[in-house]
Image (cartoon, rainbow, N blue to C red):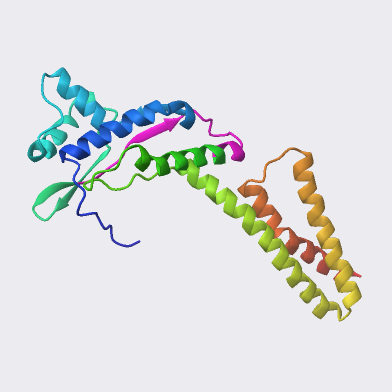
Amino acid sequence: LGMTVFDDSFDLGATESQEYLVWLCEDLEAHAADLSLGRLDCFMTALRDWRIARGETFPVTPAHFAGVAREFVRRSAAKDVNNQLGFVLDGASIKLKYAHIKAVTDLHYASPVAVRYDLKQRWLAYVDGISERREKPTTCASVAVVSYTFLLVQINADARGIAWTSVGGSTALAFAVLLIFTLNWRIAALATLTIGCIVSTVVGLVNVYGWKMDTFEAVCITILVGWALAQFKRNSSAI
């Protein structure tokens, strides 16, 4: 699948990076209602609270950050965030190469696609507006949203678009095949019209029954023209 390329300018131990990540987590909590945020697990705020509870200072001295972070992830106070840092073996030393924040929304996994799509758009709008509220330090990479649910939303959107493209292309191909098979453009045109009526009926029933155009329905519509053409060929061969 390729080789992972890390940003050499990334330095989570820098004082400005620690402060920025704490601000980002607090800003996420401040926008919890807009983002339907149900739970937020943030390594940096947990580290800050742990240090303060022990009477130690925060931000951590940059030179000591990696050691402190590795010690913290072994403590019970880090049980919810101990997988958010990426320590990578670089030559003879272990370096901190990446970090993430875990945000869990209160949106039900079976919510309609339109609702999930709207939430995705709100998250993307939030990320786009981060730089307007606070400029990120050069030691931090840009914030990005990585979500399995949002990926499925995008797949559904792409599947719907591909379904209609496939229907149009396969209908044209079906007409060409029928024309070659029958050598009669009238029969080919009537058969193609029948296929179009079948597709329209199926799509109409999707709306009548209140179904949503998800990936499953999009795949069914995609293969519908081919199925109708196969039925026509089988029936005409039997005549």
Residue 208 quadrant = top right
Extreme front residue here? 132
Viewer-proximal residue, 32 or 103?
32
Residue 200 rendering spot, x and y as whole percentages: 80, 54
Residue 25 quadrant = top left
Q: Is residue 98 magenta?
A: yes
Residue drawn at x 71%, y 61% is 167
Residue drawn at x 20%, y 42% is 12
Q: Is residue 235 shown to the viewer in this render?
A: no
Which portion, as a residue range, is magenta? 97-116
Residue 21 rendering spot, x and y as whole percentages: 27, 36
Q: Count all numbered tags in the image, as a single digit.
A: 0
Viewer-proximal residue, 207 or 128?
128
Side of 179 where 152 appears, left or right? left
Residue drawn at x 29%, y 28% is 80
Side of 73 where 108 appears, left or right? right
